[in-house]
Each structure stands twice: as C-alpha cells, then as structure tokens.
Amino acid sequence: MIYLNGEFMPIEKAFIPGLDRGFIFGDGVYEVIPVYSRLPFRLGGHLERLQASLDSIRLHNPHAEDKWRQLIGRLIELNEPEDQSLYLQVTRGVARRDHAFPATTTPTVFLMSNPLLPPTANQIENGVGAITAPDNRWLRCDVKSTALLPNVLLRQLAIDAGCAETLLLRDGQLTEGAASNAFVVSNGIILAPPKSNLMLPGITYDLVLELAEANDVAYEVRNITETEMAKADEIWITSSSREILPITTLNGKPVGGGRPGPVFQRMHGLYQEYKAQVMRAATA
Ligand code: PMP
C-alpha cells in the first residue's frame, strides 16, 4: 500500500501525471526512514531534514509535523513487514513544462513502504568493498533532492567493479558515498567529514557521532584527505538502511588489516544497543 495525494491505495493503482515536475525536472525532495518493529527510527530528525530540503528548494511544506507522523503511522500499519523502509517524496506538482516555478503549486506527496533490508551477517562479519571516484555532483549536496542522476552513475561504478559503494573525493578530500556518509578511523580516532554544502547531513552520521560522544569514543570532525583514506585503519559507510557498514577493501586494496576493525565493532555494538533501547522505551 502507498499514499498519494490524500489517498492510500495499492501501488498498482497509483499514477503520476506525465507533467509532474518530479518526473520532468527531478524538482522534488525525499526522505528514507527506517522502521524497526513498526516504529519509525529517528523520525524527528528525518522530518526536520525534510523541512530543510523543502526550504532549500523554496517549496512550501504541504503538511505540519503531526500530519506527517499520522500519514507515516498509517502507512506502516497498512504494510505487512515489521521492519520497513519508508520512502516519502514531495515534488513541485503538475504544471505546463517551464523551468520557472508555476504561479500556483499543489505539491505531489507520495509515500511508499518497502521491506527493510539491513546489511547481512556476512557483510557485517567481513565488510564490503568500495572504490573511489571524483565527486562530480552539484554544490548543494546537502539538499536531499530526487534529482539523483550523478549518484546513480557513481553508484553504478561500484557495482561494475563488484563493490558496494563509491566513495567520493572533491579536491582531494572525502565528501561521502554515492548514497551514504563515510567515516575513517586513523590511530584509533574516528574522523568524520564536517557537514557542509558538499554532503548530505545524514541522520545515521549524527547518531554515530552522538554515540561516540556519549560513550567516550574519540572522534574528530575535520576534512579527510585521499592520502589519509589510503592509509586508514578502518573505513565505514553509514545510512538509514545500511546502518554502519565496514569497508574492508578500497580500490582493490585491503583497508587496514582487511577485516572490520575494533572501532567498528564497538560502534556497531553501541548502535544495536541504542536501537534496542529506543524500541524498549517505545513499547514500555
Ligand atoms: N549521503 C547520501 C548521498 C545519501 O543518499 C544518504 C542516504 N540517504 C546518506 C548520505 C545517509 O543519510 P541517512 O543516514 O540519513 O540515511
């Protein structure tokens, strides 16, 4: 079941007009929210980032926060899996094709749910491969825009190389992954690229740093060079669907010892503990 402009319906019944600006221009923004045991995880953060994305593209938020929470709650109920990946998208609606904003806008609101596919036990145990590529995206990577052609092409480079993610370098510095944030561990310290217009402010990125801070795990938020990546003890990627995933080969070479490292193990444990705690609190 999906939600489209006021109605819940099976996905087969959902049609978007050909002139929707999301289809014509990629003129829209989106969120992906993980749902564990039917509870949306860090929903407040996702709705806040949605507001920031809408503000950036100068599109009025069609719903107040309560209404979003209500729609999301209902969609979770209408779908079977206990763990879901909830997708929501808002576009600048349907209008005659013209780059300029239409005089009046009725945004298109679309929500769907897919089964949540977290990393496999094998991926957590052994890590995954990544490659690097020049970050050739625009200069507003902080906006969670549906216009993802560069990310699509960059991710495909990884798939073509038999890897799981492409890590992006701009002016010799790590920005993020094609669909994830990236962390490096050097001399036992977690390094995180600083938030800027060059990366998406990840909800999982925030949680990793929050957990590091709360548990006295050393971290620094600063620029990371390509050379530091090549010499890193550990590299991880994070996202709402992949949680924290260790990268054990980079461009075909082992990262550190070529196995998920001790700082990853610690952070992965803290992350799972936090998740369990949030769920216990919600059902108490
Ligand atoms: N950067 C990019 C480009 C992404 O697509 C994603 C995943 N949506 C992330 C970072 C991670 O963000 P989050 O932790 O909020 O899923």
Image (cartoon, rainbow, N blue to C red):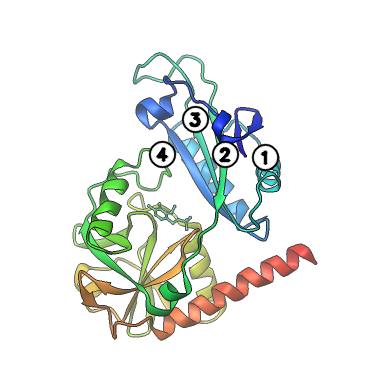
Label 3: element kind? loop
Asked if residue 250 is positioned above or below residue 133 in the image, the reply reads below
Quadrant of the drawing holding the N terminus: top right
Asked if residue 263 is positioned above or below residue 10 in the image, the reply reads below
Residue drawn at (36%, 25%) of the image: 24
Characterize the local packing of mark 3: few (<14), some (14-19) or many (20 or more) Cα atoms within 10 angstroms: many
Camera-side mark, 3 or 2: 2
Camera-side mark, 4 or 2: 2
Label 1: element kind? helix
Residue on which disc 4 sits: 146
For badge 4, the amino acid type reads Thr
Q: Are marks 1 and 2 in contact (CB under 8 Å)?
A: yes
The answer to which of marks 1 and 2 sits earlier in the sequence is: 1
Q: CA distance from mark 4 to mark 1?
A: 20 Å
Q: Which mark is residue 71?
A: 1
Residue on which disc 2 sits: 111
Q: Are marks 4 and 1 in contact (CB under 8 Å)?
A: no
Residue drawn at (28%, 61%) of the image: 167
Does the beta carbon of the residue at mark 2 sit less than 8 Å from ligand 1? no
Characterize the local packing of mark 2: few (<14), some (14-19) or many (20 or more) Cα atoms within 10 angstroms: many
Quadrant of the drawing holding the C terminus: bottom right
Does the beta carbon of the residue at mark 4 sit less than 8 Å from ligand 1? no
Camera-side mark, 3 or 1: 1
Q: Which mark is residue 59?
A: 3
On the image, the x and y values in percent for residue 105 come to 51, 20
For badge 2, the amino acid type reads Leu
